[in-house]
Amino acid sequence: MFRFFFRKFNYLTGLFKTKKPPKHENSGETEGTDDLKFHRSLKRNLSLLKSTLGESCDLILREFSFGTEPEIYAALIFIDGLVDKAMINESILQPLLYDTRLAGVDQEFSLAGMKAISRRMLAAGEVKLTDKPDKAISHILAGDSLLLVDKDSQALIINLRGWKARSVEDPKTESVVRGPREGFTETLLTNTAMLRRKLKEPGLRIESFVIGKRTRTDVALVYLQEIVKPGLVEEIRQRLRRIDTDSILESGYIEEFIEDHPFSLFATIGNSEKPDTVAAKILEGRAAILIDGTPFVLTVPMLFIENFQSAEDYYSRPYFSSLVRMLRFLSFFISIMAPAVYVALNTFHQELLPTPLLITMASAHEGVPFPSVVEAIGMVVVFEILREAGIRLPRPVGQAISIVGALVIGEAAVSAGLVGAPMVIVVSLMAISSFVVPAQLDAGVVIRLILTVLAGFMGALGISIGLLFILIHLCSLSSFGYPYLSPLSPFSPGGLKDVFVRVPFWAMSKRPYRLSRHDGLRQKPDLMPLKASSKE
Amino acid sequence: MKKDNIAGISYPKLFFFLLLTLTLITLPGCWNRRELDTLAIVAGAAIDKIPGEEKIRITAQVINPSAMQSPQTGEMSAGAKEYVNFSETGTTVFEVARKITTFSSRKLYWPHNQVLILSEDICKHGISHWIDFFIRDHETRLRVKVLVSEGEARSILEKEAALEKLPAREIGEIVDGLASTSIAPQTTLRDFLCRMLEDSGAPVAPLISLKEKEGKKETQISGTAVFKRTRLVGTLDPFESRGFLFITGKVQSGIILIKCPGSEDLSSLEIINAGSETVPLIKDGKLSVTVKITEEGNLGCQMCGSDLTKPQTWQLLEEKQNKAILAEAMSSVKKAQELRADIFGFGEAFHRKYPLKWNGLKENWDEHFANLEVNIEVESHLRRSGQISLPPHHESRYYKENHL
């Protein structure tokens, strides 16, 4: 439906503009350097690099010579701040400057060229040979060091990256009482390492992509070869390769480029900050997309019920987890429906209320100058403003917001008679409930407003029409080809073990939701703990 | 992409979908948006007859929400009453209800009406055309409690409530409280209507009156009003009322007074459980009804000093209980036959058991009922004696008390 309007809109704007075929700015530039190779002359190579990278103050060009007879001229190029300088001194400069002179370099050595240097002289772990300047440049920009030697058209890319990075900390968005406390960081390699540590299987595949013409963001696609359905990985690869943009700064960019339903209110791609959560999802047959520069990792495909699952569900006892699971469903409904139901009861269905409750509500509404629907929408909007302000403001000022919010909205508005006290309670209840299912917070805000307006026009009928539309919409959604509402629709009884309740692990022998390949068996089917057998 | 679909939905499908949506919005019917502060919530209504005229006066007790605020949240508006009684006269109920809008700022809102009090006067003239509105209108509810007032109905609504804020609510609670005494039936408009429309229709309703007690007036349930079809024909006193409830199996609780075996002192027994079964019989053209009443009770209080829990005395108590229940039931049958009003629904019992013969019976059922042979069998038991078995004033105690 949205697609339809979007297309009409595009058509209208097209009327006023003459269409030009989209042209990428960078396309011409890269073509020129594509098949360019390093020259044998160091001077020419250096001037090529200088002209490409310009006079940046953080670009360091160290020219030196090593060996005694003949003396060989060389240059080391790296970006200040992206490399570990101590390591560069220790593993490149020191061996080349001192050790070659001490040992004496023979004729054979200099003829053998770069390979021999890397094999004999460099004390660095990761060294690559290249003769392509554009590849060399992108490596320099990513933090590698480049070693150029005179009279040689090969260059050495030496990985001695090292920069200031945030250490592994508690994830801010998904805190748990019981469970691992580490969260992903902004550095891609730290993140992949965290996943490796959880999944030590050789079948863990980490495929690398570079997306973004200008940001050249490293993106990693992680999955378990044996579990994931092959079609899914191919589909993700294709969608990732399709992205031809100039910048990827956060996982949200990628999410919007690859999702199935770009106009939907609901997120069809999951994200998490916790390695254990992501590892669990990979183990269920999903794939993870890690993006350099953000601790948020995307997981696909995403199902609607994932909104109601939390890592801790699997770490605490099944009874408690199941209860909390159901509470989350309840909270979700409260958070989207509470103001709407209150408005509907207040303006259409007074006969549905028990008499004493009606009297209480009537006396609270007495003297309130607005219709209930205006009152409700006003309060919901005020709450959203307060929430937004609370997040964005610097922390010391943020405290003031909660005081103003509590005092002005909670107390003053009621005693001034602008808002009824029950409305404050309803909105607070809605606000608290909305944080129980944080994954759908943004969808919830919109749905809530729509339902409240519908309730203001048509009462319970409006609410049911609204919910029906949402249900129809949810049924039509899919995530990378998987029905969004599964295992509820299409119904699969096996998947229900992890929806409204969380059954014990020994009862979940199969991976849920048919996401994985084969029969999805993940453990022996009869693992229920036995009673202590008689001692032999 | 082909142009004959939108987001994967083909045009005919989309049209059908939009049509369904449209019907969803338009078909469900009444659409009426009203804010709470535009409603005059009716808590109770009373209908009186204006003497000598074919006119009625309706009194609607309307809640005043601003006076209902609890003292913590809002300032009590000093002197404002929690309710307002609006009265207006006219010839039809609906007309009067609307006329009230001419002097009240808000429109009467009926769904929360607790009680409908009909004056004795109006009941004697037949009430079916006065309750028509309360059945027909979509706002009024059939669950409203129907009462008949001795004397003016309005004065009962006007009597200040003692514990509740609203008199109408207090009357409603009093009717609910009948479950613990069973001295009058609890009648909703629906019950009343059902009985009224039966072939042998004789509806009943609790009778409420203002009684003078120590200089103060109290509203009190004083028995049962007996209707024949739509007219009030008589009343049952509390004793007869409970007999009537025993026969119809509607006794929930209550106190039976009996004399202690071998003494003039009284004991009171609490009814815990009661039921009944009505078996109609036509034998050789003669009609008879057998009512089997079952009852279970506890010893609630004894005034005599003897040990009542001895098996022999316990049995005697049970027999006395049997007799007391039988006496209550018989008195109600006698009264009903005098009034020729089949309040027990015996006619319906015959109707169900002898559907073909009923056609011949219903023409002069009143006659048949008045001469009906009613056999009552009571089977009652005493189960427990409370937390003690011997009374504190047992004969064996060293002290003697002289009560009264």
Image (cartoon, rainbow, N blue to C red):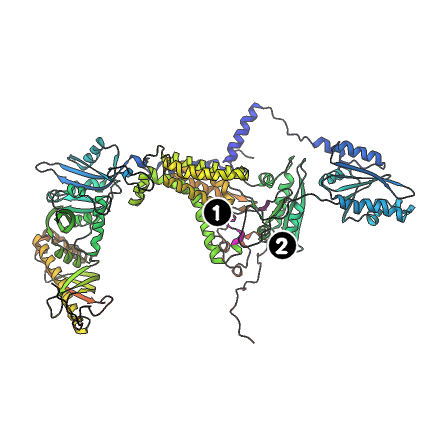
What residue lies at 39% left-to-right and 34% top-to-bottom?
Answer: A374
Identify the residue position indicated by label 2 in the image: A198
The one nearer the camera, B332 or B76, is B76
Q: Do marks 1 and 2 share a subunit?
A: yes
Left-right relation of A247 to A309: right
Q: Quadrant of residue B36?
A: top left
- Numbered range of the magenta stretch: A296-312
Q: Looking at this view, is A111 or B290 the one in front?
A: A111
Residue B187 in view (yes/no): yes
The answer for which chain carries disc 1 is A
For badge 1, the amino acid type reads Val
Q: Name the quadrant containing residue A129.
A: top right
Q: Kindly tell me whether residue A264 is visible in this rendering.
A: no
Q: Secondary structure at mark 1?
A: loop
Residue A303 position, x and y percent, is: 53, 47
Q: In the picture, residue B307 is in which quadrant?
A: bottom left
